[in-house]
Image (cartoon, helix red, strand yellow):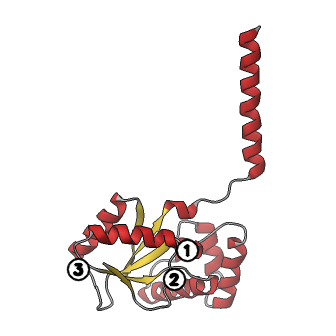
Amino acid sequence: MWSVKNSGVMLSENSIKYLDELSSLLPFDITITDGFRTAREQAYQMGETRQEQIFSGSGNLRDEYQDDELADLIQAEWPDIEKMALVIEQYADQGRYISSHLINDAWDVRTIGGPPNQLDESQIVILIETAESIGINTYRERDHVHMSVDTAWVVVEDKKEKKSSLLWLVAIGIGVALWTTS
């Protein structure tokens, strides 16, 4: 079984579908601590991460996110959360997302931080292995496991490129047809 930490955790129908399947395979309960985030909420989370990195004396946002360039641009605005959010929004408007939380197909599962459903090390391993076996991407962080599904990252293809590819295939087909009939 799975539950959310509070009513503020927003999840897509797709996320719920995966969580239902995942929880049916687990021998323990899990708590979802985060789902969809606005740009401001994402900026706040990134600001918290950056502050933790500074206090620990290591790392930067590049260490936490796949898009190094965008992570650098957002980090350059730290500690101003509003400016960080503006950068996140600007790039999201272009279809470039620093986190799948922004497109509502990601969630975080509590691993530490107290009840309910804090997980021990063996449960975390089971959680990650089970999630990955059903197509959920996982990334272990300090106090949670970040989870997302690939379908969330599908960005609308450039229609011009798609149309060009289709025309190219049609042209090849016509050429083959003409060649074989002559």
Give SS at disc 2. Answer: loop
Amino acid tagged 1 = Asn
Q: Is residue 62 left or right of residue 125?
A: right
Query: Dot 3 surroundings within 10 Å: few (below 14), some, or many (20 or more)?
Result: few
Residues 27 and 42: in front is 27
Give the percent coordinates (x, y) of residue 122: 21, 73
Mark 1 vs mark 2, CA separation in Å? 8 Å
Residue 120 is labelled as 3
Total numbered circles: 3
Residue drawn at (36%, 59%), measured in percent from left and top?
134
Residue 120, above or below 176: below
**Residue occupied by mark 1:** 104
Give the percent coordinates (x, y) of residue 56: 41, 86
Report which quarter residue 120 is drawn in: bottom left
Frontmost of labels 1 and 3 is 1
Give SS at disc 3. Answer: loop
**Residue occupied by mark 2:** 10
> Mark 1 touching mark 2, by CB under 8 A?
yes
Which residue of the protein is positioned furthest toward the top in this rendering?
A: 182
Give the percent coordinates (x, y) of residue 139: 41, 69
Query: Dot 1 surroundings within 10 Å: few (below 14), some, or many (20 or more)?
Result: many
Amino acid tagged 3 = Asp
Report which quarter residue 129 is drawn in: bottom left
- Disc nearer the start of the sequence (1/2): 2
> Mark 1 touching mark 3, by CB under 8 A?
no
- The quarter of the rendered structure image containing the C terminus is top right
Frontmost of labels 2 and 3 is 2
Give SS at disc 1. Answer: loop
Mark 1 vs mark 3, CA separation in Å? 27 Å
Q: Is residue 160 left or right of residue 114?
A: right
Amino acid tagged 2 = Met
